[in-house]
Image: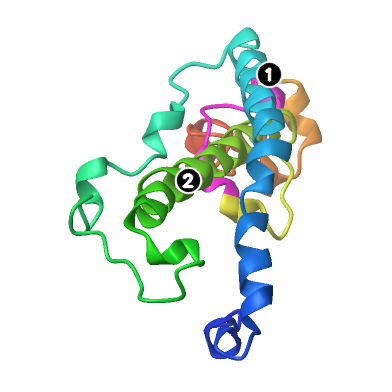
Amino acid sequence: MDRVKIGCNYVRQPFWKIIVGVPLIYLPILTTVPFVIAGVFLVKLHLIYVGGMEIKSYWDFVPAWISHRYGNNAQPAINISRYHPARYRFFWVFNCKLYCPLSVALFRYASYLVKIVENWWCPFAHDQKKTYAESAIDESFWHVDHEELTKLHPDDRQNPIWNEKVEKYCPR
């Protein structure tokens, strides 16, 4: 398994780089999250308008609060310079209970919706398509019109990611 190396290098970073680097993680809140939220709204509206039903909600991607290992009073903090925000419990509570789970959920939800769109409009296999299975649909746009099915490659016609009735749509 490939891993990103970070822990082995963190201890060698000058303190000033860490102090400057920590706030950089919050800039995406201001720069990308509003656009991702708008994109999620528009993609979900598109899916609903073309007939999408039983689409998961954003909250299906947010971990349950009870699943967090540490409560607010037990949240560990690290004994580090008094100028480092990681020294304070509120920093960890904010990050571990709000920022991280809600942001990761937002991007996972956006990915889930876009994969539904891809499965609906483009049920054509490629080497990454198997990862779209979390966004499986009943039938693709191409499966709705049975005459168009003949234009599809048999593997695209019979892919369970965008065709739940695989046995119904066998090549003729």
Residue extent of the magenta highlight = 132-144
Residue 99's tag is: 2
- Let me know if residue 52 appears in the view: yes
Image quadrant of residue 88?
Answer: bottom left
**Is 122 one of the magenta-colored residues?**
no
**Quarter of the view holding residue 156:** top right
Q: Magenta segment, principal secondary structure?
A: helix
Q: Quadrant of the N terminus?
A: bottom right
Q: Residue at x 69, y 26 (%)?
A: 39
Residue 160 position, x and y percent, is: 52, 42
| Residue toward you, 36 or 121 | 36
Q: Residue furthest front?
A: 82
The answer to whether the residue labelled 2 contacts the one labelled 1, judged by CB atoms less than 8 Å apart, is no
Give the residue type that dot 1 points to.
Answer: Leu
Element at label 1: helix
Q: Earlier in the sequence, mark 2 or mark 1?
A: 1
Q: Position of residue 130 (x, y in %)?
A: 59, 54
- In the image, residue 152 sits, relative to residue 5, either above or below, namely above
Crowd rating for badge 1 (residues with CA inside 10 Å; few <14, some 14–19, many 20+): few
Hey, what amino acid is under mark 2?
A: Tyr
Q: Is residue 153 above or below residue 96?
A: above
Tell me: 118 left or right of 94: right
In the picture, the quarter occupied by the C terminus is: top right
Q: Which residue is mark 1?
A: 42
The picture places residue 29, in percent across and down from the top left corner, at 63, 40
Nearer to me, 82 or 117: 82
Which of discs 2 and 1 lies nearer the camera? The answer is: 2
Mark linked to residue 33? none
Please name the residue shown 59% across and 32% down the image: 113
Residue 139: say if magenta: yes
Locate residue 54 relative to residue 158 in the image: left or right: left
Q: Nearer the viewer, residue 15 or 64?
A: 15
